[in-house]
Image (tube, rainbow, N blue to C red):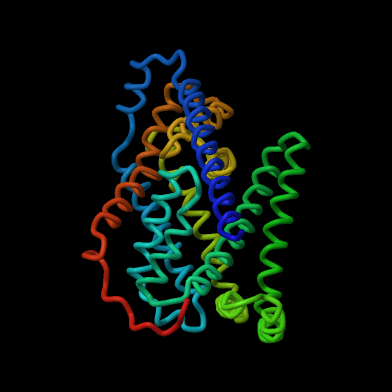
């Protein structure tokens, strides 16, 4: 009976994945058509020719620094043994994970990161998963703050405020829940053992081990200093992403403020939630054209900006992530001796 249930669940999961991919192909194709519809190609070529190489290189550097910042924050979230976590395996996993999220429309990048680091650093998957849960809660909280900033200064219609309030609530609520779990993890462990008695067979023991290591992974938030540093890194990561947009404004000769760069970042992140073509082609370009059009940038110049920004912010991660993935074990450091189980 259990095998039949697992088979049915697997079939439902496969059908959902197929539908998601199909919807992404349709939505991405429509967005790509809308972005290029009626465009004068000579106008696009002139916009691309005006791009300043020096500012574009600065945007590349900003994008690369953001990857380093993500890695340093993730390293910190392994507290209290964060100093023993090696930077290079974490950095490779971050880049490969972001590459997977860009290319595959199913948000599997975090799964890839979990498996890569768990294998290479000889950590339990639950331990790594806990750090990723904290990371996502921090990202959502900072993103909600960015949304609040954009809405406060651009005075969007009131209906958007509901979505902003939801994001704020989820971000703060998720961070608070994780903090409470970290503060009371020692008290929760006996409860986990008690509940495991009602889970039959070896699965109970395995589930108990996973839950214990998950609570252990939340220990980073027990330290006020580490918590503040993690929040500071999260703000810096968001600022670096917006800075990449702003530096590309300078590269394209747009007289737009840094706040517009923040707005564009928010628009791209919100608009990229629905499935799209592999690599987010189409939806990314359409969102940039629409966003810049709100500030008086004509379609040809906006699309030229979108193409170059795509190469700087997304394509560079895909190329680097593919290079890391292609090296396989040859590009890995020697795995650590096993210290924890799965």
The percent coordinates of residue 121 (x first, y second) are 38, 75
Q: Is residue 133 visible?
A: yes
What residue sits 67% from the left and 79% below the top?
196
What residue sits 31% from the left and 46% below the top?
57
What residue sits 49% from the left and 58% below the top?
237
Up/down of 160 relative to 74, above or below: above
What residue sits 58% from the left and 54% below the top?
4
Residue at the limit of the structure toward the front, as seen here: 1
Q: Can residue 226 be seen in this view?
A: no
In the foreground, 129 or 94: 129
Look at the image and tell me in which quarter the N terminus lies. Answer: bottom right
Instruction: Please tell me in which quadrant of the rendered image residue 205 appears.
Output: bottom right
The percent coordinates of residue 280 (x first, y second) are 45, 38
Instruction: Please tell me in which quadrant of the rendered image residue 202 appears.
Output: bottom right
Q: Is residue 51 left or right of residue 298?
A: left
The percent coordinates of residue 124 (x first, y second) are 47, 75
Q: In this view, does 71 lie to the left or right of 1?
A: left
Please state the total of marks drawn on the protein image: 0
Q: In this view, does 320 lie to the left or right of 250?
A: left
Up/down of 148 relative to 76, above or below: above
The percent coordinates of residue 216 (x first, y second) are 57, 80
């Amino acid at each position: 009976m259990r095998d039949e249930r697992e088979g049915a669940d697997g079939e439902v999961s496969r059908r959902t994945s197929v539908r998601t991919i199909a919807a992404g192909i349709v939505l991405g194709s429509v967005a790509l058509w809308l972005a290029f519809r009626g465009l004068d190609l000579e106008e696009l070529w002139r916009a691309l020719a005006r791009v300043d190489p020096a500012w574009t290189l600065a945007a590349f550097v900003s994008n690369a620094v953001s990857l380093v910042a993500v890695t340093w924050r993730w390293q910190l979230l392994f507290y209290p043994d964060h100093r023993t976590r090696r930077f290079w395996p974490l950095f490779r996993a971050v880049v490969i994970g972001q590459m997977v999220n860009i290319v595959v429309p199913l948000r599997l990048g975090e799964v890839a990161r979990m498996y890569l680091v768990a294998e290479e650093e000889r950590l339990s998957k639950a331990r790594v998963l806990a750090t990723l849960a904290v990371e996502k809660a921090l990202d959502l909280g900072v993103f909600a703050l960015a949304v609040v900033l954009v809405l406060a200064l651009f005075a969007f219609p009131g209906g958007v405020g509901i979505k902003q309030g939801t994001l704020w609530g989820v971000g703060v609520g998720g961070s608070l829940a994780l903090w409470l779990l970290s503060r009371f993890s020692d008290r929760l462990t006996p409860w986990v053992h008690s509940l495991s008695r009602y889970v039959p067979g070896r699965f109970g023991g395995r589930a108990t081990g996973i839950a214990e290591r998950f609570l252990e992974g939340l220990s980073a938030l027990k330290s006020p200093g580490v918590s503040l540093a993690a929040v500071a890194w999260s703000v810096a990561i968001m600022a670096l992403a917006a800075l990449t947009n702003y530096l590309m404004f300078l590269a394209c000769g747009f007289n737009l403020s840094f706040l517009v760069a923040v707005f564009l970042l928010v628009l791209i992140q919100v608009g990229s939630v629905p499935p799209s073509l592999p690599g987010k082609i189409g939806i990314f370009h359409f969102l940039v054209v629409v966003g810049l059009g709100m500030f008086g940038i004509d379609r040809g110049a906006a699309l030229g900006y979108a193409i170059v920004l795509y190469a700087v912010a997304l394509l560079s991660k895909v190329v680097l992530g593919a290079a890391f993935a292609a090296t396989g074990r040859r590009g890995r450091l020697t795995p650590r001796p096993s210290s924890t189980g799965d």
